[in-house]
Amino acid sequence: MKTSLKLAVLGAFALTLLSGCASYTGQTSDPNDPNRTRTGALIGAGIGAVAGLLSGKDATERRQRAMVGAGIGGLAGAGIGAYQDKQEAELRRQTAGTGIDVTREGDVIKLNLPDGVTFDFNSAALKPQFYPALNNVASTLAEYNQTMIEVSGHTDSIGSDAVNQRLSEQRAAAVSNYLIGRGVQSVRLQTIGMGKNYPIADNSTEAGRAKNRRVEIRVVPVQAQS
């Protein structure tokens, strides 16, 4: 499938789920320090490509307008960074020891949900033991509601493109639907399956494949409309 067609299909899927309804770096600093260094090793242009697909200017503006229509205000100037600092610190506190990694790039907060703690092998059903951690994430996202939430599912390279694409979609949808069920407004969410196309580690090793099997949540601030 040509790249342009694939992106169009993925975009259509995301918009469909929107009507109904993080990167792996390891945590090496104080989890409650919102100003810690925020870096991570990426494989290829994976995370940047995902950010571009999910957060392109037109898509972001459409969601911002939808959120304003739902009564959700935007942030401006220095208030954006301060707002995200507080939310990041709370997310780190709520997810400490759960297996969820919280990272930061600029004003975007990212949560990485490894499949080892969220799903059984080849399953899209959330593990019941993971509910408390996801409940904490949902409560924080619901409280800090001046943000858009992008949920993307990812797989390793084992298996066919079709199987991996379907599993990534189902897992992203499972996380999104759970967040909505815990009070996160559906208008804030965009959900998409990325299959095996955006690895963050080497798929030739089991350790690398384990890192690639994940659901990522990106928390993007809504900017006030001028």
Image (spheres, rainbow, N blue to C red):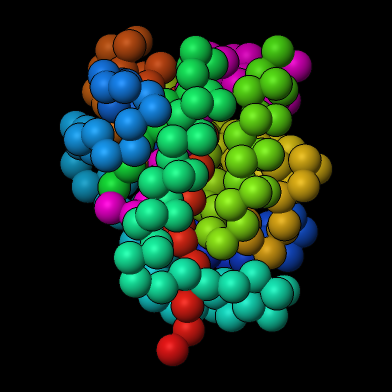
**Residue 158 occupies quadrant:** top left
**Residue 197 occupies quadrant:** top left
Q: What percent of the width, then of the height, locates residue 91?
A: 51, 34
**Residue 124 occupies quadrant:** top right
Q: Which residue is more in the foreground, 153 or 25?
A: 25
Q: Outermost residue, bottom direction?
A: 226
> Exactly how many numbered labels are in the figure?
0
Q: Outermost residue, right direction?
A: 181
Image height check: is 155 above or below 80?
above
Image height check: is 65 above or below 141?
below
Residue for point 34% across, 10% down: 206
Can residue 105 be seen from the camera position used here? yes
Can residue 156 be seen from the camera position used here? no
Residue for point 74% across, 38% down: 178
Image height check: is 67 above or below 219?
below
Q: What percent of the width, then of the height, locates residue 207?
A: 33, 11
Q: What percent of the width, then of the height, locates residue 81?
A: 35, 57
Residue for point 41% across, 32% down: 102
Answer whether residue 153 is magenta in the image.
no
Q: Quadrant of the N terminus?
A: bottom left
Q: Which residue is more in the foreground, 140 or 134?
A: 140
Report the side of 167 relative to 80 (left or right).
Answer: right
Q: Which residue is more in the foreground, 119 or 104?
A: 104
Residue for point 58% across, 52% down: 144
Q: What percent of the width, then of the height, locates residue 132?
A: 70, 21
Answer whether residue 112 is magenta in the image.
yes
Image height check: is 210 above or below 73?
above
Q: Which residue is more in the foreground, 150 or 64?
A: 64
From which residue to which does the magenta span run?
Answer: 106-128
Q: Quadrant of the C terminus?
A: bottom left
Report the side of 44 relative to 178 (left or right).
Answer: left
